[in-house]
Image (cartoon, rainbow, N blue to C red):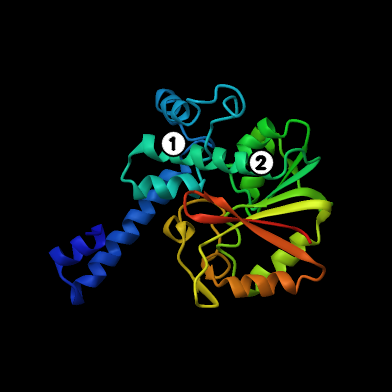
Amino acid sequence: MSFKRWIQNKVGIGENREKLALIEKRIAALATIQQWGLPEILPIPEALVHRAWALVFEENKGLGASSPRGIHRSDPMFRYPFQVHGGDAKQVLQEYYQTGWDAATVLKKTCPSPEKVLDFGGGYGRVGRFLASIYPQAKRMISDPKSSAVDYQIKHFGALQDDEQAMDLIFAGSVFTHLPRSAFTSTLHALLGRLSRHGVLVLTLHEFISAEYIFHPYTEESALRELEDVLSKEVYGSVYCSESFWREALHTAGGLWKYTILNERFGGTQLYVVVSAG
């Protein structure tokens, strides 16, 4: 039973709805005040970080294991699962690092030696922290609507500001799972237009559904309003689409494009879709 439902059962509804709303607002206010006092990198106990990291890299002591471990205070990819799991820090840390490392290995297998890589919508570096390890010779770029996220990846992961040039590899992890319909199509077309001659776009989607397109204005962003640079629910929601919608969006990009759906899953749930010139 959810905390909210429990409170409803205890205090009732109707005239007490206002009391429940007030409690929620006070909790949100406390979360905001707490956020102001946090350092840029969360002060997670080193022993806890080490244990989670060791579980991810227990079979790999080389590639990836020396990547930076720090997590930004406003990273929703860490903060939201942390509250969902009720404070089970080791599990959240392990899942966070595992998802990033697994994505990096998928990219390496899909595009072994790109010269230019763009982490599009890369946020605070759940995947970006590993790109220097798997692509040490590549020029690694970062693009994200959150300026704090871009600054963080530049400062701590050695990424470069996106220069809008052609890319050999573009990764858009958990980007198209959030975009409104018009932005979904226009963003897809824009990214395809930035691929080099033999470039590859790797993106993730939720499992295809029968309905053409569904946009829900509820995400980890809407649940964590205290974080900096929070995106509006009008431009960042939860998206599900049919494969026919996806094919049409790809078809209208112009040119000949082919796509492959990989067996692996991003974060255990989202499809990896690899797009290249047909």
Depth check: give the residue in front, 130 or 122. 130
Q: Is label 2 or label 1 in front?
A: 2
Q: Is residue 12 left or right of residue 220?
A: left
Q: Quadrant of residue 249?
A: bottom right
Q: CA distance from mark 2 to mark 1?
A: 22 Å
Looking at the picture, how far across and down is residue 21, in whole percent? 29, 66
* Residue corresponding to mark 1: 94
Q: Are marks 2 and 1 in contact (CB under 8 Å)?
A: no
Q: How many marks?
A: 2
**Crowd around label 2: few <14 · some 14–19 · many ≥20 (10 Å):** few
Q: Look at 66% across and 34% down and name the residue there.
A: 157
Looking at the picture, how far across and down is residue 159, in whole percent? 71, 38
Amino acid type, residue under disc 1 in the picture: Gln
Depth check: give the residue in front, 221 or 181. 181
* Residue corresponding to mark 2: 109
Looking at the picture, how far across and down is residue 38, in whole percent? 47, 38
Q: Quadrant of residue 8?
A: bottom left
Q: Look at 50% across and 28% down and name the residue there.
A: 57
Q: Secondary structure at mark 1?
A: helix
Amino acid type, residue under disc 2 in the picture: Lys
The N terminus: image quadrant: bottom left
Q: Quadrant of residue 107?
A: top right
Looking at the picture, how far across and down is residue 204, in whole percent? 59, 56
